[in-house]
Image (cartoon, grey):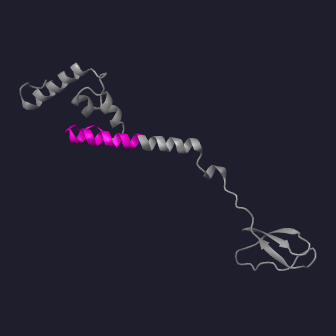
Amino acid sequence: MPRYDYKCNQCRTITEVTQSFKDDALTTCDVCSGPINRTYGSVLIAPSSMPTRSEAARVEKETEVMHKDVAAYKRMRKDGVQPKSIKGAAELEQRAGSRWEVETGMNIGGNEKLGRRFDEAQSAIQSGQVAEL
């Protein structure tokens, strides 16, 4: 049940009363029998319900990274490459030296020469020029 504060208009006594929502408001002071009014104080908001600055900064950074990942994913899809997921696409786009690295999500250290060999071997296998093992 809610607690209400009542303040006497004559003696200024403040009385705290627990009442049901259905109960009528009190009208007379217990101390001096003068008229009283229900007062409304400040509302207490628990600190745990408010985001912290570090939380807001973390969310902002995650949002920024997500936007970069989505943009990189769209660029790679436009180039005909299918990354494994959107998450981490910006970093993958930056580090990958070959189409194979992007599509498998496996990074071989950005070695472009080795990456091109993987791409060439994959193309040969897909075109039927080389039998798969």
Residue in front for this viewpoint, 131 or 100: 100
Q: Is residue 85 visible?
A: no
Q: Is residue 121 above or below residue 93?
A: above
What is the x, y in percent for residue 126?
Answer: 11, 31
Q: Is residue 16 above or below residue 10?
A: above
Q: Is residue 28 above or below residue 95?
A: below
Residue at the limit of the structure toward the right, as seen here: 32
On-image quarter of the N terminus: bottom right
All told, the count of numbered labels is: 0
Residue 114 location, quadrant: top left
What is the x, y in percent for residue 110?
Answer: 29, 23
Q: Tell me where the magenta segment starts and ends, as one range.
A: 65-85
Residue 71 included in the magenta stretch of the image? yes
Left or right: residue 113 compared with residue 25: left
Left or right: residue 6 compared with residue 70: right
Residue 115 location, quadrant: top left
What is the x, y in percent for residue 69?
Answer: 35, 40
**Dominant secondary-structure state across the stretch colored magenta:** helix
Q: Residue at x 31, y 21 (%)?
A: 109
Q: Residue at x 92, y 72 (%)?
A: 11
Residue at the limit of the structure toward the left, as seen here: 129
Q: Is residue 100 visible?
A: yes
What is the x, y in percent for residue 20?
Answer: 72, 73
Q: Is residue 5 above or below residue 57?
A: below
On-image quarter of the C terminus: top left
Left or right: residue 33 compared with residue 66: right
Residue 70 location, quadrant: top left
Q: Residue at x 42, y 42 (%)?
A: 64
Left or right: residue 53 compared with residue 81: right
Q: Residue at x 33, y 37 (%)?
A: 89
Residue 66 included in the magenta stretch of the image? yes
